Image (cartoon, grey):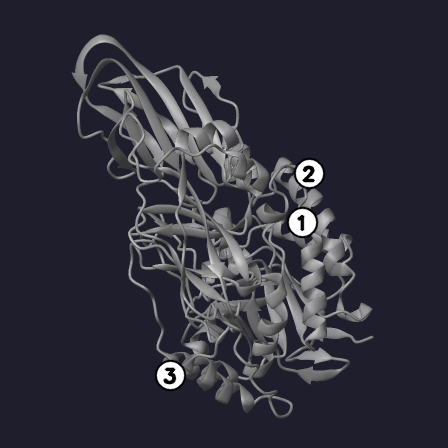
Amino acid sequence: MAEFRVGEDDFEMDGRPVRLLSGALHYFRVHEEQWGHRLAMLRALGLNCVETYVPWNLHEPRPGGYRDVEQVGRFLDAVRAAGMWAIVRPGPYICAEWENGGLPHWVTGPLGPRVRTRDPEFSVAVGRWFGALLPQVVERQIDRGGPVIMVQVENEYGSYGSDAAYLRGLADLLVDLGVRVPLFTSDGPEDHMLTGGSVPGVLATVNFGSRAREGFEALRRHRATGPLMCMEFWCGWFDHWGAEHVVRDAQDAAGALREILECGASVNLYMAFGGTNFAGWAGANRAGELHDGRLEPDVTSYDYDAPVDEFGRVTEKFRLMREVLAAYADGPLPPVPPAPPVLGAPVTAGALERVPLVTVLEGLGDPESTHGVPPTFEELGVDRGLVRYALEVPGPRQPYEVRVRGLRDLARVHVDGVWAGTLTEQDAVLPVPVAGPARLELWVESLGRVNYGPRLGEAKGLTGGVLHERQYLHGVRARALRLDAFDDAERVRALEPVDGAGDAEPGGDDGRGLYRGGFEVRGPVGDAVLELPGWGRGFAWINGVNVGRYWSVGPQRRLYVPGPLLREGANELWLLEWEAPGAAPALTPP
């Protein structure tokens, strides 16, 4: 068995200095059958280590309802089989452009700003979660023959808070649960971040995308000794819906990597392989320097302009970084694996049948509940999906404007069954005044919970109220449609369609709903992209697996479909469309 330790100046493996050349690869953003290929790509890039987060909300979507925590262990076994070491970052908060920064909605809902502090209720929830998760990590530490060499305490805590007792308690909890490999923290190279996020006696690392010497100088002001490591070297970036696609020049990124290594430091490429935010798990940010402005939801693709792209292919950034890393490798780099197989030929979906959205809600949604004021998604127990709120405008009364306070994020409004407008946080007044009596329906969708900054954990749905003129409307009926309801494929298939997929529903529903159809794949099966020309906004499933959100605002125009999801012959397609349908969907080679 090996021993990994933090020395005075270097990391040490069995007493010998080692440099960590690591890359981020999140097991939950890649199909499990593709782990081996992506790990082999990272080895060929010149890396000896893999870093991954662990999203709490993915594995405990309901209190005590753990879901495939063993996946963490299987991934670490795959890392070991690839001949690499592993760095594990279990949170409880992970950021990662992931829904709610990995924190479950059922934790942030009732606790609000008490999360990520020493609050007893938060501590109990974290302790229970770590008790379920940590055996997967502890059993695979380097001194037990596994690949795990380091475990992180929290994540970039100095960007958020200053509760030293909370951080110390987390570090002690990890040790109490059996972590024997070195612990570490990671923060931006600024004084307030390093003071707020560091733990005495625990290795501190820094995160940045350029100016390595300045970053390490900042770290040395706080830690005079210990190995230097950039735990997140941001070699690319992520995209927001409705914004421009972000690209970092490959030469620039390779030069910044070279500067890190010339400082004698270790590095973790964030991301080495980005992957995909399947099933609506993409998070969101708030605009502005203080991260308190308009909502900026993240797209489905987490390609990140990484050296290995979303399809597992070599990029120019890969080639240039491989040249840099080769100079620091112990020996010749392994050959680059062949690209994954791709779909042999484009195929267009057959005729689609439509199930009206109201029918979908009645067949798959939660029971309707009645409240005095609109309940939030958190109060309804909804992580991803939409909620229909129904209210009555008393009458008779004159036409007045309808305003929504605290809307998060989009509300499609119907008055007496007729679409009257779509509201946002910034534009939350219905364009046409409403007279009473009238029935209001607000179909509210979450575009992703904030994953970074002071508004982490904010509620979704109608978080304030609905006003008619200056009067709140009370007495609200709410019914939720959760995305995970579609996990029950038999219930989805049992929903009754209407005649004519393109027909609008009575009352002006404009064809929203669940569209079902399929593809006949002939010939080679492999990675593909789903093309949805003219479709508005919604989610797509291939053979019962949610491959993510699509949205006509871009910049993402196609959804990645992993080859293991497809089969030769008949393949099933579902589209949950919340605006209006478009032309025939198609599967095409990447």
In the rendered image of this protein, does residue 273 appear above or below residue 362?
Answer: below
The image shows residue 521 at horizontal and vertical percentages of 49, 62
Circle 3: element type: helix
Q: Which residue is pictured at 54% across the width and 65% down the height? A: 563
Q: Amino acid at mark 1?
A: Gly
Which callout, 2 or 1, points at the residue further toward the start of the chain?
A: 2
Task: Using the rendered image of the protein, determine whether residue 203 is visible from the camera's viewpoint.
Answer: no
Quarter of the picture containing the C terminus is bottom left
Nearer the observer, disc 2 or disc 1? 2
Q: Which residue is pictured at 24% across the width and 37% down the height? A: 427
Circle 2: element type: loop
Q: Amino acid at mark 3?
A: Gln
* Residue linked to disc 3: 251
Label number found at residue 169:
1
In three-dimensional space, the C-alpha distance between marks 2 and 3, rounded to whole angstroms, equals 47 Å
Left or right: 588 with respect to 143? left
Nearer the observer, disc 3 or disc 1? 3
Label number found at residue 64:
2
Q: Which residue is pictured at 51% across the width and 54% down the height? A: 571
